Image: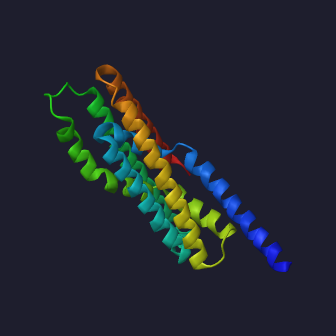
């Protein structure tokens, strides 16, 4: 009987963790905006690579939380401030690049493969750095995971579940955006590029200015 009660409590905790994770993952943020931006610029492969880079960044924060380094970074105001400013500057830079691509004079025609190849080559790194430069993810992991697990292996296991869910969600985003983007041409495509660029710049400025 006691085992059954404990088992039910564990299942309830897992269900609660999955519910919170789904809510956080489905809420659009800088990782979603970057995935959309890279998908529009580099196609489906670039979007998927961005999603995997984001998940790799989350996995890094997961391990840091599991071994206690994450809590030390959160407690260190200079380190946390430097991380926040660096992340904000990086997002602004990526947004500015998207804006430039949207407003620059129309280039000479090139094949889709040639246009997307450079973006695909950078997509994983951009997703990784974007997530690592977001101190909110560090705060999230160090505050959420200990509520559902109390050992390092347990923390890391739950964190990796979160990373997997994030990768699946963002990859789905990339596939949907790629399909929709195939039908966009000319002015409408440039407007969408400009919009994603503005979103990234705004997110970067907000991240760098937050206290």
Q: Is residue 37 left or right of residue 1?
A: left
Query: Where's residue 122, x and y in %?
Result: 27, 52
Query: Where's residue 79, x and y in %?
Result: 47, 65
Residue, x 44% and y 56% (percent of image)? 131
Query: Where's residue 53, x and y in %?
Result: 38, 57
Q: Foreground residue, 78 or 125?
A: 125
User: Total marks drawn?
Assistant: 0
Residue, x 53% and y 78% (percent of image)? 67
Q: How is the image coloured?
A: rainbow
Instruction: Decide: is 94 above or below 49.
Output: above
Q: Is residue 31 visible?
A: no
Picture quarter containing residue 103?
top left
Q: Residue furthest top?
A: 187
Instruction: Give the quarter of the figure containing the N terminus.
Output: bottom right
Q: Foreground residue, 94 or 210?
A: 94
Residue, x 60% and y 75% (percent of image)? 154
Q: Residue furthest left?
A: 108
Query: Where's residue 81, x and y in %?
Result: 48, 59
Instruction: Decide: is 45 above or below 150.
Output: above
Q: Is residue 16 left or right of residue 175?
A: right
Q: Is residue 121 left or right of residue 76?
A: left
Residue, x 27% and y 48% (percent of image)? 120
Q: Is residue 114 visible?
A: yes
């Amino acid at each position: 009987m006691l085992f059954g009660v404990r088992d039910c409590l564990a299942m309830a905790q897992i269900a609660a963790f999955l519910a919170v994770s789904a809510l956080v993952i489905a809420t659009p943020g800088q990782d979603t905006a970057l995935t959309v931006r890279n998908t529009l610029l580099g196609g489906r492969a670039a979007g998927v690579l961005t999603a995997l880079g984001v998940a790799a960044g989350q996995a890094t924060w997961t391990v840091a939380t599991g071994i206690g380094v994450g809590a030390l970074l959160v407690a260190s105001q200079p380190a946390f401030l430097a991380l926040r400013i660096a992340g904000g500057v990086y997002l602004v830079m990526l947004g500015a690049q998207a804006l430039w691509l949207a407003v620059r004079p129309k280039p000479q025609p090139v094949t889709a493969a040639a246009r997307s190849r450079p973006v695909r080559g950078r997509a994983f790194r951009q997703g990784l750095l974007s997530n690592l430069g977001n101190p909110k993810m560090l705060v999230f992991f160090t505050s959420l995971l200990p509520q559902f697990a109390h050992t390092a292996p347990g923390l890391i296991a739950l964190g990796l579940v979160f990373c997997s869910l994030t990768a699946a969600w963002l990859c789905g985003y990339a596939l949907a955006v790629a399909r929709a983007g195939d039908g966009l041409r000319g002015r409408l495509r440039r407007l969408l590029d400009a919009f994603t660029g503005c979103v990234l710049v705004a997110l970067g400025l907000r991240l760098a200015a937050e206290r």
